[in-house]
Image (cartoon, grey):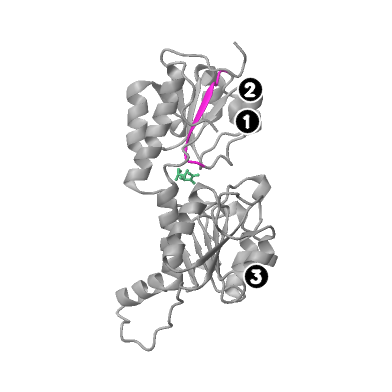
Amino acid sequence: MSSHQQTPADRPNVLIAGPLPPDLVARLDAGYETVKLWQESDRSAFLARHGSRFDVLATSGVFGADAALMKQLPNLRLIASFGVGTDPIDLAEAGARGVQVTNTPGVLNPCVADAALGLLLGLARRIVVADHAVRAGEWTAGRRQLGTSLKGKVCGIVGLGGIGREIAHRVSACGMHVVYHGPRPKSDSPYPYYASLVDMARDADVLILSLPGGTATHHLVDATVLHALGPAGMLVNVARGSVVDESALVEALTQRTLGGAALDVFENEPHVPPALLSLDNVVLTPHIGSGTTETREAMSQLVLANIAAYAAGRPAVSPV
Ligand code: 8YV
């Protein structure tokens, strides 16, 4: 058996990296030997003493799995991640150690795309600002700033993968013209492709980010891109905070060289730059793109299916 094949285990020992959804944790507890790493008061001491016990790590696109953690788990065979993004998982280290990595692709595409559309509408139609005004008893307090229509506007999607395509359908239904940017054109896409993100930002009214995070896309959206999007332009990010130069974004929003931003993700979550909190041209949500009961359940089921496949010596259901 090569080191890249999984070793079947009767009853895997599952280390749970962080507080995954309680019903997923309960089902892991019911099926396997589990330890909740975040509940250990001295994590390093615990791992030094017991790290060799675990063959499965259950983690997420937030908690990840770095090389240091993998080194403390010498018998690790499977990293089952709750989420599609693998940027906080050191895939090279996992590969070198023969550790299988699985994630939860596909099942979250529609809900993340819904979140992107909701953020865009919330920003363009000033729904969040209007809600605050009504709650503050300001319905009749002066003239309200009008919103921006989406119809006929150009929506530039950065990353036309599964989520990006779902976003494209939704904004098309609002009458927007879709264009896209990514590492290469997609032969099966009907939308115009831009090899240059700056060129697309210059031509677009809205940029929606739905690309993977990680070193390859770090600060892809920088001051130049934001400047090209311009004072009427809107940025929506449901991808990763790391893909945007957040300092440049704060500067552009406060100086009004960018029209507005609707952000579900941030560079240093859960930290949100304080300068954003008082702006009326932003919408801020706490990484809720996949956060519906239905989608989180589907994600949980995929995590469980991948661990069950490993336990039975079967191929992973959704390998990375
Ligand atoms: C989170 C996500 O993983 O799928 C992803 O990559 O960012 C989200 O779905 C999820 O919220 C778990 O923390």
Q: Is residue 91 above or below residue 277?
A: above
Q: Which residues are magenta?
A: 75-84
Label 2 vs label 1: CA separation?
Answer: 12 Å
Q: Mark 2 to mark 3: distance in Å?
A: 44 Å
Is disc 2 placed on a helix, strand or loop?
Answer: loop
Residue 17 in the image, given as x and y percentages of width and height: 48, 33
Q: Position of residue 275 (x, y in %)?
A: 55, 68
Q: Quadrant of the C terminus?
A: top right
Pick whichever of labels 1 and 3 is earlier in the sequence: 1
Give the mark toward the camera: 1 or 3.
Answer: 3
Please report whichever mark, 2 or 3, sits nearer to the chain's N-terminal start. 2
Camera-side residue of 184 and 219:
184
Whether residue 310 is visible here, answered yes or no, is yes
Q: Are marks 2 and 1 in contact (CB under 8 Å)?
A: no
The residue that disc 2 covers is 97
Q: Is residue 18 above or below residue 196?
A: above
The residue labelled by disc 3 is 202
Give 233 or 262, whichever is nearer the viewer: 233
Q: Quadrant of residue 149?
A: bottom left
> Looking at the picture, how far across and down is residue 114, in whole percent?
41, 56
- Circle 3 sits in a helix, a strand or a loop, which is it? helix
Residue 123 shown in magenta: no
Q: Compared to 109, does 26 lie above or below?
A: above
Which amino acid lies under the numbered mark 2 shown in the image of this protein?
Arg
The secondary structure type at the circle numbered 1 is helix
Instruction: State the residue position of label 1.
Output: 68
Badge 1 amino acid: Ala
Q: Nearer the viewer, residue 138 or 238?
A: 238
State left or right for residue 57 relative to residue 95: left
Q: CA distance from mark 1 to mark 3?
A: 42 Å
